[in-house]
Image (tube, helix red, strand yellow):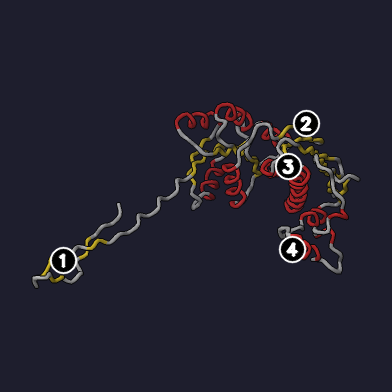
Amino acid sequence: MPSTTPTNNQPPTTSHSGRASPRRLMYSYSRPPMPAPQPHRLLIVDDDPSIHELVQAMLVGANWEADSAASGDEALARLQGHTYDILLVDILMPGMDGLALLGLLRSRYPHIPVVIMTVKNTPDHVLGSLRRDAAAYLSKPFSRDAFLGTLHNALSTPVPGDDIKILSDKPNWISLQIRCRLATADRLSQFVRELPSDLDPEEREHVATAFRELLMNAVEHGGHLDPKKTVDLSYIRTARTIVYYIRDPGEGFSMDALAHAAVANTPEEPFRHVELRRQLGIRPGGFGLLMTKSFADELIYSAKGNEVILIKYLT
């Protein structure tokens, strides 16, 4: 309740008769404190106790509460009597593995997002998680920032069951079709980042950044964020190369029409596009394609401009 403590420090007043009137009690008012937000609840499912300790430590000060389960069966038992906002599930567990548990969770608790984690990245693990509608995919070890960011995104972004279609699931030739939603493209990028798991971490992050930029462009500029339209993409692995192929449903583009992008700048005027974007009323930016070209060994567009191949050579 608000504080209404009386104060008696007012001087007495005098009535018309000259006699002192009783002092009036003054009340001070203080606004009640805002209630603290309820913490999110996480269930950690992993047979490794050290992972539970690590995750609990990462959650300190982040407004999360976490419970632990050491197996899929224990996780299902906990869900019968407790409510959780999100589940963090390891793949490699004895008995019921994480992918089998994920399948049961999606059928019994479809409203609860599930983040998959694993120390062993394989195409089967990545595609198995996608096929069962995992909200996100984390490769161990992961940083605190990456972990908390993944939890936030998984909570705030629903997973429509038909947004990603797997067309080919061969480990060396993976083909997908996705609806033109930015959230879907962003979610898929997390999974595709883990496919070349044998690359140096920095190199893998560069390739993933380039792929994400191309995919976002395809969804936004080629598909115009129309979820009725789709983008086709493939990840192809050979003995000496990694190839990403993306085709959007748009009319394509010409490099000559990209004067507002940094990739069109000349060495003499490396920031010419910044002034042009200001004149055209376009938001600041335009460095995405230039960054993509710097991270790829080869970047090849079709004549129409709605298909692109990104090539990374393996040393």
Which residue is denoted by mark 2 in the rendering? 167
**Pair 2/3: label in front:** 2
**Which amino acid lies under the numbered mark 3 shown in the image of this protein?**
Val
**Which amino acid lies under the numbered mark 2 shown in the image of this protein?**
Leu
Which residue is denoted by mark 4 in the rendering? 278
Q: Could you give the CA–CA distance between mark 4 and mark 1, rounded to whole angstroms?
A: 67 Å
Residue 311, percent across and down? 85, 47
Q: Earlier in the sequence, mark 4 or mark 1?
A: 1
Q: Is residue 85 left or right of residue 33?
A: right
Q: Which mark is residue 23?
A: 1
Any part of residue 129 in sight: yes
| Marks 2 and 3 in Cβ contact (< 8 Å) | no
Which structural element holds mark 2? Answer: strand
In the image, is residue 280 above or below residue 232?
below
Residue 167, percent across and down? 78, 31
Residue at 64% in and 43% down: 138
